[in-house]
Amino acid sequence: MLTSKCLKGVMTGYPLAINATNIKVTEVDFNPEFITRVIPKLDWEVLWTAANSIGHGEGLPKILEPKYEDNEELLKKVHRVLLEVEIEEGNLTCPESGRQFPISKGIPNMLLTEAEVQ
């Protein structure tokens, strides 16, 4: 959901590419109702791309199937990607400008210099 469209010359700035150098996985209790409610709010293609780019997309279909709410295995995979996998270190890259935003201790630094702001 992050975008870099505040950068000069950037029209969309979405989706940001992920380059993770350190990933932490922490187990979280599975709540299928919560995941079922979150899925319609996601840009599925972006989630699929992001999960694969960090090596955690195994088993996620490229296209979300109808009746996904009845597929507990799929819900568990989405749960894992959304709630258990955290990028500790790395960077996010704007698809239009190539500007990189560092991720440190799990927090992306999206601050821009004055010269970069539109």
Image (tube, rainbow, N blue to C red):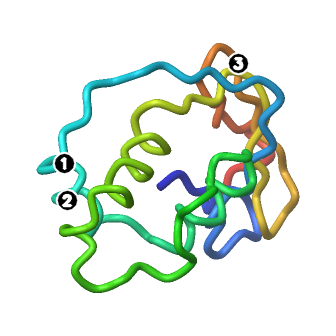
Query: Which element is circle 3 on?
Result: strand
Mark 2 lies on residue: 36
Q: Earlier in the sequence, mark 2 or mark 3?
A: 2
Left or right: 74 as drawn, with respect to 61: left
Classify mark 1: residues with Cα within 10 Å, few (<14), some (14-19) or many (20+). some
Q: Nearer the viewer, residue 83 or 46?
A: 83
Query: Which element is circle 2 on?
Result: helix
Above or below for 71 versus 7: below
Picture quarter with the C terminus? bottom right
| Image point (27%, 73%), residue name | 68
| Image point (69%, 50%), residue name | 117
Q: Position of residue 20 (x, y in %)?
A: 78, 36
Query: Which element is circle 1 on?
Result: helix
Mark 3 lies on residue: 104
Q: Nearer the viewer, residue 63 or 5?
A: 63
Q: Earlier in the sequence, mark 3 or mark 1?
A: 1
Q: Position of residue 91 (x, y in %)?
A: 78, 37
Disc 1 and disc 2 in contact, CB within 8 angstroms: yes
The kind of residue on which mark 1 rests is: Pro
Give the foreground label among 3 and 1: 1
**Alpha-carbon distance for marks 1 and 2?**
6 Å
The kind of residue on which mark 3 rests is: Ser
Give the foreground label among 2 and 3: 2
**Alpha-carbon distance for marks 3 and 1?**
30 Å
**Quadrant of the image occupied by residue 24:** top right
Per the rendering, the mark at residue 4 is: none
Q: Residue furthest top?
A: 105
**Alpha-carbon distance for marks 2 and 3?**
30 Å
Mark 1 lies on residue: 32
